[in-house]
Image (cartoon, rainbow, N blue to C red):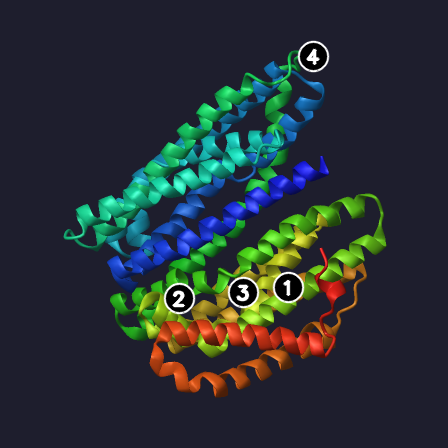
Amino acid sequence: MKYKFIKNAMILTATSLILRTVGIFFRIYLSNKIGPEGMGLYQLVFSIYILAATLPTCGISTAVTRLVTEELVSGSRHSVQKILRRSLILTLGVSLICTAAVLFGANFIAEKFIKDSRAALSIKILSLSLPFMGVSSCIKGYFIARRKAEKPSGAQLFEQFVRIITIVFFINLFSQKGLAFVCAAILIGDTIAETASCVHLYILYEKDSRTLPGALHSRPSYRITPRLLKIALPIAGSHYLNSLLRTIENLLVPNCLERYTGSKEISLSQFGMLKGMALPILFFPASFLTAMSTLLVPEISEARSRKQTLRVESTVNRTMQITLTSSILIAGIFLILGPKIGKLVYGEEQVGYLIRALSLIVPFMYLESVASGILRGLDQQLQSFKYSIIDSSLRILLIFFMVPPMGMYGFLIIMVISNVLTSVLNIRRMLKVTGVKLKLVKWIISPTIAVITAGAITAMLFRPIISRGILTFTILSGLSISVLYFAFLFLTKTLTKQDIKP
C-alpha cells in the first residue's frame, strides 16, 4: 500500500511538472501572439473563470474520494456507482446554475467588474465549460479512491494537448479580428479541452467500473447526499471565499493602475506582464518543492496519528531545510539574472525587472506553500485558511490606498508585505504545533551568505562572455551560481551528506 501511494504521488507530481513546463512555453507563445495587453485581458477573464469553476468543482472530488474509499472496503459495485450518480447529479445541478448566471451576466460582468466590454464574449464561452469541469472532478475523485492516479493524470495531459492544438488553430483563425476575438479563441480552446477531457474520463470510468468488486450489500441511497454535502460544502465554501477575494483583487489592480497611468492599455499591459508573465516564471521552480511536499505531507499526517512526535519534528526539519536551501538559491538567481531571463523567455526586459523586483520574496512564497501543506497534514487547515483570508483582505485594502498614487511600484510593495505576512503566520503556527525550533544560521544566514558569494564570484568570472549571447551567458551564470552555492554550503557544513539522503 505504501509503495502504491508513493507511486501515485510521483505520477501526480510528475504530471504537474510536465504541465507547468508546457504551460510556461505556451505562455511564451501566447505573449508573443497577443502581447502584454492581451495577456492582461486574458488574465482578468481567467480570474472570472477560476471563480466560476470553484462552486461546481471544489469539494466534490474530495467527497467522492472519501465515500468511494469507504464503499470499496465494505460496500458494493452498486453502491459505488450510486455515489457517482448522485455526485454527478449534484455537480451538474450546481454547474448549470453557474453556467446560466455567467452566460446571461457576461455583459454585466465585463462592463461593471472587468470594465472592458471586449471580455464579454470570452466570459460567455467559458461558462459552457463549467458542467464538464464538474463531471471531471467527480470522476477524478473516483480514480483517486481506486488508487489509479494514472487515469486522471493521463486525462490532464490529454486535455493540455487538445488545449494547445485548438488554441493555436483558433488564434490564427481570429488573429485579424481584434483582441476580443483573440481572447475568445483562447477560451474556445479551453472549453473544447475541458469537454474532451471529460468525455475521456467518463469512458475510462465506464470501463473501470465493470471491474469493481461484486455486491456485498447496497447502502440506502438517502444517506449519500447528506454525506456528500457534509464533506463537500465546507471545502467548497472556504475555496470559494478565498477565490472570490483573489478575483476581486485581480479586478481591482488594473482599474487602480489605470487611475495612475491614465491609460487602460498601459494598465492592462503592466498587469499582464506581472500576473501572466513574471509570476509564472517565479513559481515555476516551485514545481519541484511541490513534488517533495506531496510525498512528505502524508508522512507527517501518519506520524501525527501514531503520535510519533520525533518523526514529525524530523520530517518538518528536513522539509524546512530543503525548502529554504532551494528557494534562497532560486531567489539569488532571479535577483542576479532576472532581466536576462525576462529578455530570453519573453523578449521583454521589463518583465525581467519585475522578476528581479520580486525575487527577494521567492523564499517567502515557497515557504508559505510548503508550510500550509504541512499544516493540512497536521489537521490545521482552518488556521491556514484563516491566514489566507486575512492576507486577501489586507491586499484589497492596500490596493485601494497604494496603487492609485504609486502605480505598479505600490502593488509590488503590497506583494512583498502580503507574502512576508502569510509566510510568517503559517511558519509560526507550524513551529508552534510541531515544537520545531527555527535554525536561523543553518536555514537562512549561511545560505544567504553562500548565494551572495556565489553571485559575486560568477559576476566577475562571466562578465567577459556576455557578448557571446544572452542564452550562453544566462545558462553558464546560473550553473556557476548553483555549483558555487552548494560548494560553499558543504564546505561550511551547513549542508551534509546526511541532509540529502532520501
Answer with the quarter of the image where residue 352 lies.
bottom left
| Alpha-carbon span between mark 4 and mark 1 | 47 Å
Mark 2, residue position: 274
Q: Decide which of tag 2 and tag 4 comes sooner along the chain.
A: 4
Give the amino acid at mark 3: Leu
Question: Is the C-beta separation of discs 2 and 3 under 8 Å?
Answer: no
Give the left or right position of residue 342, taking residue 87 as reference: left
Could you tell me how far apart the alpha carbons at marks 1 and 3 are, in whole angstroms? Answer: 26 Å
Label 1: state its secondary structure: helix
Residue type at tag 1: Thr
Label 2 SS: helix
Q: Residue at x 27, y 62 (%)?
A: 35
Q: Residue at x 70, y 74 (%)?
A: 490
Residue 461 coordinates in the image, percent (x, y): 49, 85
Alpha carbon of mark 1 to alpha carbon of mark 2: how far?
24 Å
Q: Position of residue 139 (x, y in %)?
A: 51, 30
SS class of the residue under badge 3? Answer: helix
Q: Position of residue 87 (x, y in %)?
A: 53, 26
Which label's residue is closer to the chain start, 4 or 1? 4
Distance from disc 2 to disc 4, alpha carbons, whole Å, reads: 56 Å
Residue wearing tag 3: 394
- The answer to whether marks 1 and 2 mark residues whose Cβ atoms lie closer than 8 Å is no
Q: Nearer the viewer, mark 2 or mark 4?
A: 4
The mark found on residue 323 in the picture is 1
Q: Quadrant of residue 250?
A: bottom left
